[in-house]
Image (cartoon, rainbow, N blue to C red):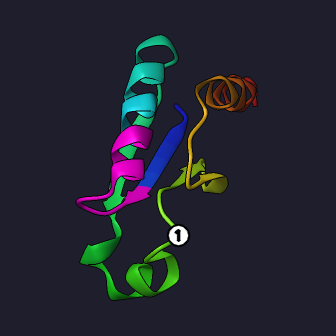
């Protein structure tokens, strides 16, 4: 199964929007979703503090700041064929 990680933080509008898109697409294309709160880890806060949301698909960065539904579907379909 494809692993999708969402790096986000509480109170971030773009992060909330990204999560909504991910959950919507997850209904159509199954994947495992892990949400990582950057404020819970000093290294991640330093690395991604203001550069969020960031979405990784199977460990590779797929999106930064915005998640686009059609592009996400395309990337997930390609990843499931591997």
Q: Is residue 15 magenta?
A: yes
Residue 73, x across and y down, in percent: 63, 23
Q: Nearer the viewer, residue 7 or 77?
A: 7
- Say how many tags the image has: 1
Q: Is residue 22 above or below residue 62?
A: above
What range is drawn magenta here? 7-18
* Residue that carries the numbered disc 1 in the rendered image: 51
Q: Left or right of 51: which side holds 14?
A: left
Q: Along the horizontal axis of the image, is 70 left or right of 55?
A: right
- Residue placed furthest toward the front: 13
The one nearer the camera, 30 or 52, is 52
* Figure quadrant of residue 36: bottom left
Q: Residue at x 63, y 31 (%)?
A: 72
Question: Measured from the top left, where is residue 43 in percent x and y?
Answer: 42, 86
Question: In the image, what residue occupies the spot 70% across and 32% down?
Answer: 75
In the image: residue 39, left or right of residue 78: left
- Image spot of residue 27 (x, y percent): 40, 15
> Is 81 left, or right, of 46 in this rendering?
right
Is the residue 8 above or below the residue 70 in the image?
below
> Does the magenta portion include 53?
no
From the viewer's perspective, is residue 80 above or below residue 56?
Answer: above
């Amino acid at each position: 199964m494809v692993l999708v990680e969402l790096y986000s933080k509480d109170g971030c509008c773009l992060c909330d929007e990204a999560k909504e898109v991910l959950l919507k697409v997850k209904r159509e294309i199954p994947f495992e979703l892990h949400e990582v709160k950057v404020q819970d880890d000093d290294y991640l806060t330093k690395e991604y503090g203001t550069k969020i949301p960031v979405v990784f698909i199977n460990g590779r960065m797929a999106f930064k700041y915005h998640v686009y539904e059609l592009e996400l579907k395309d990337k997930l379909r390609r990843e499931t064929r591997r």
